[in-house]
Image (cartoon, rainbow, N blue to C red):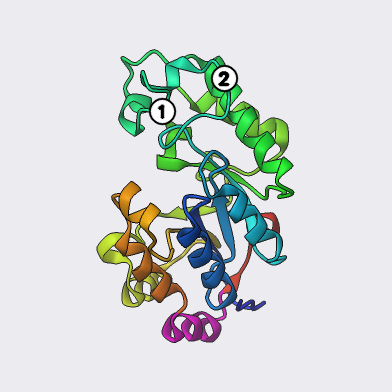
């Protein structure tokens, strides 16, 4: 992991979807140890979360937060029927953002609590909180989510009062060293979170996610000599959310 102390830009390189699969977990860990990833966000309800927790506990320098998830997999809380389909699975992002869909705020609170409890019981300590598919910005979720994060004293991705700007552009065809370097060259913010999705591709990822193969490309860029040397030469300070 490359840490440096100078420069006029502070950069949090956050890897989303920790816990989605073992391949994702291993790719994130490798991008931290051998690349520029400083932080990760974990999905406490996903099948590989226990493996994720075991992995990050061995990486003392990796920040880890809760990636609140109500769009993929099953809930951890009981009785949250307004969040699930007839088979007990989360319904995906569209219903969460649909104003016609009657989501009970109490169900959001129950699931937030259950996922955070699972996160804490795993031995991880949160440095921040965000969400899968940005559902914490949905009108049905935002107030409950903000109250929950405020109670815990955790920073929230792209919150109105945040000192950290969010860059979501490093994705799909833009997941290239040239794009990232160009973005950082033009950056005028003091502190930026770069949202990323590195991972090693395994069967669980291939069969479950529409964003699978590009994760390998993101990993390659985030561990590349070109990006590591650029950040070092530019004097960009790589930090975690709890170092802002």
Instruction: Give neighbour class at mark 2: few <14, some 14-19, many 20+ (Cα, 10 Å).
Output: few
Discs 2, 1 touching: Cβ within 8 Å: no
Tell me what residue is drawn at x 74 percent, y 49 percent: 123
Q: Quadrant of residue 111?
A: top right
31 horizontally vs 241: left or right:
left
Q: Given the current orientation, which residue lies at the most extreme left position?
A: 173
Judging from the image, what secondary structure is the residue with disc 2 in?
loop
Quadrant location of the N terminus?
bottom right
Judging from the image, what secondary structure is the residue with disc 1 in?
loop
Tell me what residue is drawn at x 39 percent, y 70 percent: 186
Question: Against 213, is 162 above or below?
Answer: above
Residue 16 placed where, x, y %?
Answer: 48, 53
Question: Against 27, is 138 above or below?
Answer: above
Tell me what residue is drawn at x 47 percent, y 83 percent: 230
User: Which residue position holds label 1?
Assistant: 89
Estimate the spatial distance between the alpha carbons at disc 2 and disc 1, rounded to whole Å: 12 Å
Looking at the image, can residue 38 be seen? yes
Q: Quadrant of residue 37?
A: bottom right
* Residues in magenta, as a range: 224-236
Q: Is residue 132 magenta?
A: no
């Amino acid at each position: 992991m490359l840490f440096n102390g100078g420069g006029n830009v502070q950069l949090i390189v956050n890897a989303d979807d920790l816990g989605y699969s073992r391949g994702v977990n291993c790719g994130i860990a490798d991008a931290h140890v051998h690349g520029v990833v400083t932080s990760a966000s974990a999905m406490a309800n996903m099948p590989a979360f226990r493996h994720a927790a075991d992995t990050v506990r061995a990486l003392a320098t990796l920040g880890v937060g809760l990636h609140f998830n109500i769009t993929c997999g099953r809930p951890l809380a009981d009785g949250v029927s307004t969040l699930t389909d007839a088979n007990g699975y989360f319904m995906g992002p569209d219903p969460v953002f649909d104003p016609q869909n009657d989501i009970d705020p109490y169900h959001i609170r129950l699931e937030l609590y259950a996922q955070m409890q699972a996160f804490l019981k795993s031995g991880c300590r949160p440095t921040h909180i965000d969400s899968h598919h940005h559902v914490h910005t949905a009108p049905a979720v935002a107030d409950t989510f903000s109250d929950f994060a405020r109670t815990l004293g955790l920073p929230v991705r792209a919150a109105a009062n945040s000192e950290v700007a969010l860059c979501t552009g490093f994705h799909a065809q833009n997941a290239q060293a040239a794009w990232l370097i160009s973005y950082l060259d033009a950056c005028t913010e003091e502190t930026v979170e770069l949202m990323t999705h590195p991972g090693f591709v395994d069967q669980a990822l291939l069969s479950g996610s529409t964003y699978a193969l590009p994760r390998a490309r993101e990993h390659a860029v985030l561990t590349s000599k070109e990006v590591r040397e650029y950040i070092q030469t530019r004097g960009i300070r790589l930090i975690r959310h709890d170092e802002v």
